[in-house]
Image (cartoon, rainbow, N blue to C red):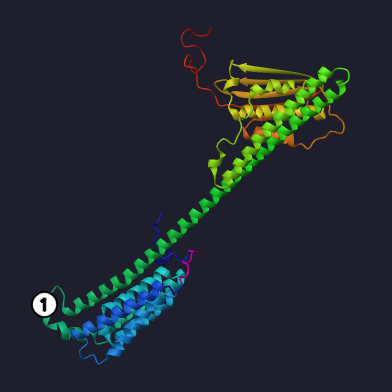
Amino acid sequence: MPYARPNPVRRLGEHFAVDSDWMRPVQPVSRGDVTTGIVVGLASVLTVELSRGMGYFEGDGFSRWFQWTAVLVAAALLVFRRRFPLGVAMLAAAHMFLLGVTDPALMAQVSCQVVYFTCFYSAVAWGRDRRSMLAVVGLITVFMFGWLAWQFAVGNAIQEVTKQVGKYAGYGWLSPVASNIILTFLVNVVFFGGAVALGQVSWRNALQRERLRTQSATIAEQSESLRRKAVIEERLRIARELHDVVAHHVSVIGIQAAAARRVLDRDPAAAKGALGEIEGSSRDAVTQMRGLLGTLRAVDDVAAGDPARTEGSRAPEPGLEALPDLVALHRVGAVSTAYDLVEDPAGSADRLPGAVALSLVRTVQEALANVSRHSTATEVRVVVRVVERQVGSYAEVEVLDNGRPRPGTSGSGLGQLGIRERVASHRGQSEIGPRPAGGYRVRVRLPLGDPPPDPAHGADGLARAGGPS
């Protein structure tokens, strides 16, 4: 494959980022710019007078006022070098050319050279349109080197060199004229090349700072978005909890109230018991609602940036130990309920994570509330299974009834939606709907993290010492 030589023009454009969409912000004339112009102007006047005292301008034929005006005009350019970088660079080049033609000794003053260097540097550093910057700076550089070549080729620069240093011929590697020409070109290469290089470094540093600022703002915005998302998700969780608590306890209160009304005359003791259940259920509902409201206040504190106030604001969440009483509350009148807990191995239920146990309890609450409100069921069975294996551990709850939908009692569907959302948050599986043999089924299976292997068994689950029993 032939070697493809890089395009110098394209590489130059890439170096100066002519295709960049970023533009350095326009800088207004500041007090610091004005101060810089005044200080440099006074220093230039002082330098001119000190040079005059050393006889530097002897015989040049220009008055003090002309020289002062020239250096003060040059210093004034520094005031606008950041506001109008390209325009100031062109004015500095014109000033340098005119002063070099009329009074070369004054143009060669250190103060003037500092001003020119700074203006050319600022054009590269602060030029907003990189294509225009490259065109202006390139034109200035070509013009200056062309002027320099013209002075040596057509002007009297060689005669001046010969008159001043011709007597030193033979002292160096090259003749005085050749040495002067080479040195002059090298000095100008360093002068203009240094201004361009430093200006480009400054521009790229500004671009890097802008990118870092943008990235920082993006990260802060994303962090705020994630915080808001977390708050919204927590509010949705609380809404589901509140729906489950209210729906369950109101359902229980309605069932017990209906039972008490039916037996109030013929069995006052049973009515009294039902009223006691109503009292206990209402107190439990108030307690759980207070806990949820405390959690809601904690979410508001986090949203307001005060997480310290959340300590102690949440009540303990119910676990599997609450299920027997929960199921028994729905054993009213002709409705019989049963609860079974299946563990493999024994004690697995005690090791359930709190979030999983809470999801199982809320699923049972919602399923039983739906049976009470919308079903003609007379038998309800709740089975909880907790299975721990080396691979594929899970916790499952199944609520089965033998009823049919009660006419005129269609619900909003929010309860079942809450069940599915809980299951999705645990990456589990759900099955909600009528059974082929009659009745209704709510089944939820949530995966568990696999337990660590028993030290007494190998990876295949067999006993290390005696083999299978």
Q: Can I make out residue 370 in this image? A: no
What span is colored magenta in the figure?
Answer: 20-27
Judge left or right: residue 146 versus residue 380. left
The quarter of the displayed image where residue 361 is located: top right
Residue 282 location (% of width, % of height): 73, 30
Answer with left or right where residue 77 lies relative to residue 355. left
In the depicted structure, whether residue 56 falls above or below residue 255: below
Query: At 16% across and 78% down in the image, what residue appears?
Result: 175
Give the quadrant of residue 344: top right
Q: Residues within 10 Å of mark 1 (few under 14, many from 20)?
A: few
x and y percentages locating residue 358 in the rendered image: 64, 29
Q: Is residue 23 visible?
A: yes
Q: Nearer the viewer, residue 293 or 77?
A: 293
Task: Kindly identify which residue carries mark 1.
Answer: 170
Residue 193 percent across, percent down from the top left: 32, 70
Q: 306 or 131, which lies in front?
A: 306
Q: Is residue 25 magenta?
A: yes
Q: Main secondary structure of the magenta part?
A: loop
Amino acid found under the numbered disc labelled 1: Gly
For the view shown, which residue lies furthest in the right direction? 265
In the rendered image, which quarter contains the N terminus? bottom left
